[in-house]
Image (spheres, grey):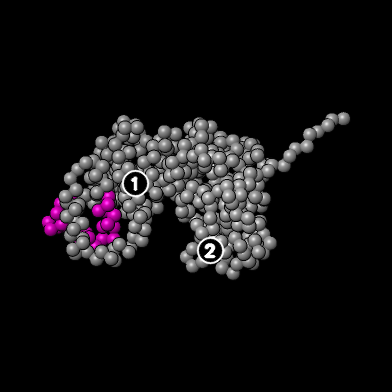
Amino acid sequence: MFDFLKRKRNQPVVYKRSEHCISRKNIDPDALKVLYRLADAGYTAYLVGGGVRDLLMGRKPKDFDVGTSAKPNEVKRVFRNCFLIGRRFRLAHVRFGEKVIETATFRRNSQSVGEIIEHASEGPFEDNTFGTPETDAYRRDFTVNGLFYDIRDFSVIDWVGGMKDIEKRVIRAIGNPDIRFQEDPVRMMRAVKFSSRLGFRIERKTFAAIKRRHSCILTAAPPRVCEEVFRFFPYGHSAEAFKLAWETGLLGDLLPDLSKAIDKSGGKSSMAWKYLRVLDELEKLRESEGIEVSNGLRAAVLMTVMLRSGGGNAKEGVSRKVMQTMLSGINIPKATYFTAVLLMESPVRLGRSPERGHARFIYNKDFLDALDYNRIVLRAEGRDERFVNEWADFYELKGNKDELVQDRR
């Protein structure tokens, strides 16, 4: 007869209010309403994900997401302003005007906690099962995104070591990174995004897994890949993001011509990074003004990087060919494509004084983006910005500034 040792149930580390910096005054009031009302109705409800991470870092979260033990239909019964979305896995969107507090029932993978996706070759993953806070934490992508904030006692609940990794400034995959990236290749792009945006390093095993598995990104759904590419830009850290994507091999899969152009023009010393750094300066400026940089402008700069790094120029016709390469590579929306083409060809108009013709271009809805695009290119290349300044002055004098600026908000 064998004596078996009793296995202890996994226990989280719970950080009391005095052990962390999160304050309710920094949490969106509508997110608090959702948390309190679910708790009052007898359900477990936590603030989850990136919002907790950002609050712990002293940053202002863009979104506040809620995880709960309540099933989607139960959430809908608690909130009249709730709408259920999704077919494969239903999410509850609790709406307050134009604002949405995404509320998801705790989920689990088909595998046991702590052994996430260890049998990737056995068939499709069952990711459509309700679970517990524990299983929900272990199925998330990175430890820094696996933290929960409990509104009942103001504690932070940590199943996965995320608090220590925030202190160490590390992006670490939860579970086996090779398997997690095969499960969802877009997680590799998210690792790059978080590393560059937060200023964190990617943990050694996680980084090595990206370098081994980067080609898996070719199996991901193109719309998701396109969305993540454009998420490299906000907050002004695209130069770091694309350099990291290039170093890991991801860029060679996503935009092979751009990766080759960077290799050809000096790799780490390529001029490509200068264009992106100037764009990053604009991203930070526009963020402070409450204006989001358009994806058309971002795409135009990215393709100009590819063209100029390869020794070409954005002449009419050439820019369309370059953009077609990008369109086929990551399947960007056609509206973004046409805007980017217009911007890449705008130096023909803005390369001379407005008095000499084409002055009506100031009334084009993309004129302000064209100004920004030309300034980025000229500044990156250290060229004279005199004509761009003349167009800006002419716009201030003649253009309907308020109306056009409003279009960008």
The disc labelled 2 sits on which kind of residue?
Answer: Asp
At 63% from the left and 62% from the top, the residue drawn is 38
Earlier along the polypeptide chain: callout 2 or callout 1? 2
Q: Are marks 2 and 1 in contact (CB under 8 Å)?
A: no
Reply yes or no: does residue 354 show up in magenta.
yes
Q: Residue furthest front?
A: 18
Res 3 visible: yes
Magenta segment, which residues? Answer: 350-373
At 48% from the left and 32% from the top, the residue drawn is 211
Quadrant (top left, top right, bottom left, bottom right) of the N terminus: top right
Vertical arrangement, residue 303 with respect to residue 294, above or below: above
Label 2 secondary element? helix
Residue 280 is tagged as: 1
* Residue placed most toward the observer, 195 or 123: 195
Vertical arrangement, residue 264 with respect to residue 200, above or below: above
Give coordinates of residue 310: x percent, y percent.
29, 36
